[in-house]
Image (cartoon, helix red, strand yellow):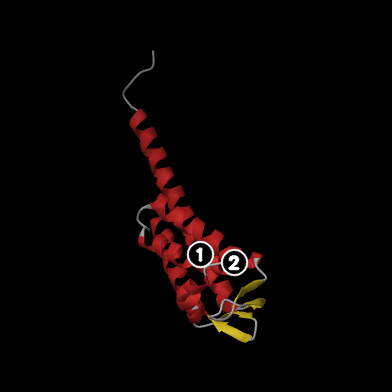
Amino acid sequence: MKQLSRLFLVCSIGLFVTSLTQPAFSAGNWVETPGWFAVLFGIFALSGAGLSWLANPLLILSWLTFAEKKVSFLFSLLAVIAGSSFLLFTQIIVNEAGGYGPITDRHLGYWLWLSSTIVMLAGNGIGLIDLYSHKTREGKEKNTCPNSKVH
């Protein structure tokens, strides 16, 4: 299961990188916002729909803490929540003056980006299941003495 969990990590990173090459969303006068632009400059719009940008550092922290299953799971769960929150908003900041425009569409880049968080969460879930199943098996093995008799 450890290798399966690693495969999810690699797929998550691959989906994220691919999302950067695709249009992420359309808003206001912008026909399409490229994924790389949304990741690089989203930090400057950390209000309303821009809060979903926080999924980026959370996802990266999930990747970096992959060996610590519980911590990585928490970061990936928060990344999914933050990334999904973009679906709840109808407007986003579209210019330097802080003006808002309507979110008119979510494109392939957004869905790939969101998928990268979900895939990482799934991989961490598998890792946690593997971790706890090993602990359960080890606990049972410690409590089992083949030569002992119950009185």
Which residue in the protein does label 2 denote?
Answer: 48
Residue 49, percent from left and from top: 59, 68
Q: Residue 74, how many percent across, how many down?
A: 46, 53
Residue depicted at x 47% and y 72%: 43
Q: Residue at x 56, y 82 (%)?
A: 33
For residue 41, which numbered disc appears in the image?
Answer: none
- Residue in the image at 40% along x and 47% along y: 131
Residue 15 visible to an observer of this rendering: no
Which amino acid is tagged 2?
Gly
* Mark 1 crowdedness (10 Å alpha carbons): few <14, some 14-19, many ≥20: many
Q: Secondary structure at mark 1?
A: helix
The answer to whether the residue labelled 1 contacts the one labelled 2, judged by CB atoms less than 8 Å apart, is no
Q: Position of residue 55 (x, y in %)?
A: 49, 65
Image position, residue 112 (x, y; %): 54, 73
Circle 2 residues within 10 Å: few <14, some 14–19, many ≥20: some
Asked where in the image residue 90 lies, by quadrant, the reply is: bottom right
Residue 28 figure quarter: bottom right
Position of residue 124 relative to residue 21, above or below, is above
Label 1 or label 2, whichever lies nearer to me, is 2
SS class of the residue under badge 2? helix
Residue underneath mark 1: 117
Quadrant (top left/top right/bottom left/bottom right) for the C terminus: top left
Q: Quadrant of the N terminus?
A: bottom left
Q: Is residue 5 above or below residue 35?
A: above
Residue 106 falls in image quadrant: bottom right
